[in-house]
Amino acid sequence: MDDTLKRLLETENAARELVEKAQSDSERLVQTTLHEARQQEQRFEARVPELHAAFLEKSDQRAKQTVAEMERRFQERLTQLRDAAETHEEAALEAGFRALLGLEDTVLP
């Protein structure tokens, strides 16, 4: 019986040592993971200005493209309006003269 108690105590001590080692390993793993997480957070925070600048650059490019497209459309529309004005200029002048002279119903040669 004495041997059985010795073996039980040895087994209990071995189990306690295993538990303590597992707890120690677990704590070390948690600390290592926390340290790595802090390092990654610091790397990310260091990159924030770079990411912000890249975002602003892309936004600026899109804005410039939009402005260029709007200017192109404006020029196209302006050209269309000028062409229409030139096309209808003579008829408008004729109608204006008729109105001034009170000849709305008379066709001018």
Image: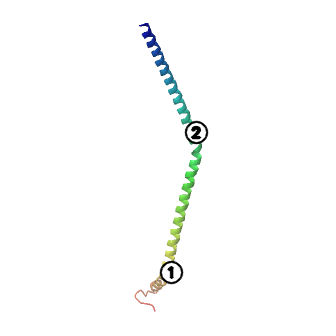
**Coloring scheme used:** rainbow
The residue where tag 1 is placed is 86
Vertical placement of 4 versus 19: above or below?
A: above
Check disc 2 and give the amino acid type: Gln
Point out residue 103 in the picture as x, y percentages from the top left corner.
43, 88
Point out residue 55 in the picture as x, y percentages from the top left corner.
55, 51
Q: Residue at x 57, y 54 (%)?
A: 57
Instruction: Give the class, few, some or many, for how many residues have Cα within 10 Å of label 2's Cα (few <14, many ≥20).
Output: few
Point out residue 31 in the picture as x, y percentages from the top left corner.
54, 29
Vertical placement of 24 versus 85: above or below?
A: above
Vertical placement of 26 versus 43: above or below?
A: above
Check disc 1 and give the amino acid type: Glu
Disc on res. 2: none
Q: Return the residue found at the far bottom.
A: 109
Q: Return the residue found at the far top.
A: 2
Nearer to the camera, 44 or 76: 44
Vertical placement of 24 versus 102: above or below?
A: above
Q: In the image, which is nearer the foreground, mark 2 or mark 1?
A: 2
Q: Residue at x 58, y 44 (%)?
A: 47
Q: What element carries label 2?
A: helix
Q: Is mark 1 on a helix, strand or loop?
A: helix
Point out residue 89 in the picture as x, y percentages from the top left corner.
49, 82
Nearer to the camera, 92 or 97: 92
Give the Cα separation between the discs numbered 2 and 1.
66 Å
Q: In which quarter of the image is the N terminus?
A: top left
Number of numbered discs on residues:
2
Q: Earlier in the sequence, mark 2 or mark 1?
A: 2
The residue where tag 2 is placed is 42
Instruction: Give the class, few, some or many, for how many residues have Cα within 10 Å of label 1's Cα (few <14, many ≥20).
Output: few
Q: Which residue is drawn at 51% across and 77% down?
A: 82
Q: Are marks 2 and 1 in contact (CB under 8 Å)?
A: no
